[in-house]
Amino acid sequence: MDVALLVNAPIFGVLSARSLFALGAFALAALTISHTRPGRDLVATGSDRQAARIAGVRTGAVVIGVFAVSGFLAATGGALISYGIAAASPAALANTLVPAIA
């Protein structure tokens, strides 16, 4: 089976699997931040690291966890883009990098 066709194929004629994954990741992050203790710890650490540390939050673990999740999501996004264009070339999206930064 061709993965590029699977990733780009619309589900129910509306959204692709790539779009559904992004929406699912966003919904999971929103629910995690608003309804769990690690989410409250994350908000507290982001607001004021010293105050969070005084309140008993292990801020070092929170920061490391955020970087780990960020790296995983960046790698997953890169893999989905690579599957979508059916190429694993580092120069495939070179023309879109500068407008994305600017």
Image (cartoon, rainbow, N blue to C red):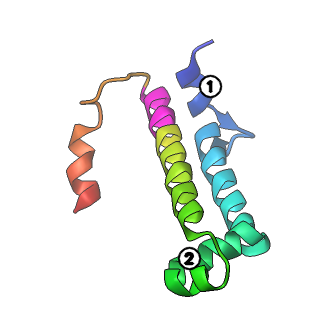
Q: Mark 1 sits on what residue?
A: 6
Residue type at the position of mark 2: Thr
Residue nearest the viewer, comparing 27 with 51: 51
Residue annotated with mark 2:
45
Report x, y in % for residue 22.
60, 50
Q: Position of residue 17 (x, y in %)?
A: 64, 38
Q: Position of residue 1 (x, y in %)?
A: 63, 12
Label 1: how many residues lie within 10 Å, few (<14), some (14-19) or many (20+)?
Answer: some
Q: Is residue 48 above or below residue 62?
A: below
Tell which residue pokes out farthest to the right in this image.
Answer: 35
Judged from the image, the secondary structure of the residue bearing numbered disc 2 is: helix
Q: Which residues are magenta?
A: 78-85
Q: Residue 29 in magenta?
A: no
| Residue drawn at x 23%, y 39% as measured from the top left | 94
Which residue occupies 57% across, 56% down?
65
Name of the residue lying farthest toward the top: 1
Dot 1: element: helix
Residue nearer the viewer, 21 or 49: 49
In the image, residue 70 above or below residue 42: above
In terms of image quadrants, where is residue 3? top right
Question: Which is nearer the eye, 57 or 83?
Answer: 57
